[in-house]
Image: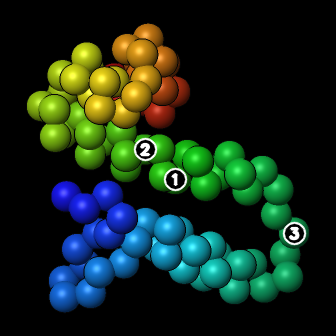
Amino acid sequence: MNTESLDNGHQHESLHQCVAQALEKYFLHLDGQPTNELYQLVLSEVEVPLLEAVLAYTRNNQSKAAEMLGLNRGTLRKKLKQYNLL
């Protein structure tokens, strides 16, 4: 898989573009309402599908998933518990 783009049908979009578009939509829907902890919101929204996809790819092999993510296995397990993925 090309790390710079995701196949979205016939259209290729970078992960950067997908996040930017999602944030634009989020801000539009705020309609002037205040928001806080946006950084943590974005991280949790991105981390969960990332962890799920890597675990699926590695067939739930946490050692391989941790290596693939560049995390130690303890950190991976902590994140899996944090998001109730264990």
- Mark in front: 3 vs 1: 1
Q: How is the image coloured?
A: rainbow
Vertical arrangement, residue 10 with respect to residue 82, above or below:
below
> Could you say where residue 13 lies in the image, as x and y percent from the top left?
36, 78
What is the secondary structure assignment of the residue under circle 2? helix
Q: Earlier in the sequence, mark 3 or mark 1?
A: 3
Q: Which residue is mark 3?
A: 34
Q: Which residue is mark 2?
A: 48
Query: What amino acid type should be assigned to the residue bearing mark 1?
Result: Glu
- Mark in front: 3 vs 2: 2
Q: CA distance from mark 3 to mark 1?
A: 19 Å
Vertical arrangement, residue 71 with respect to residue 14, above or below:
above
Vertical arrangement, residue 50 with respect to residue 79, above or below:
below
> Could you say where residue 15 lies in the image, as x and y percent from the top left?
43, 66
Question: 10 Å neighbourhood of mark 2: few (<14), some, or many (≥20)?
Answer: some
Query: What amino acid type should be assigned to the residue bearing mark 3?
Result: Pro
Residue 6 has which mark? none
> Could you say where residue 36 lies in the image, as x and y percent from the top left?
82, 56
Residue farthest to the left, as pictured? 59
Residue 45 has which mark? 1
* Proximity of marks 2 and 1: CB atoms separated by less than 8 Å: yes
Q: CA distance from mark 3 to mark 2?
A: 25 Å
What is the secondary structure assignment of the residue under circle 3? loop
Does residue 32 appear left or right of residue 61 in this picture?
Answer: right
Quadrant that contains the C terminus = top left
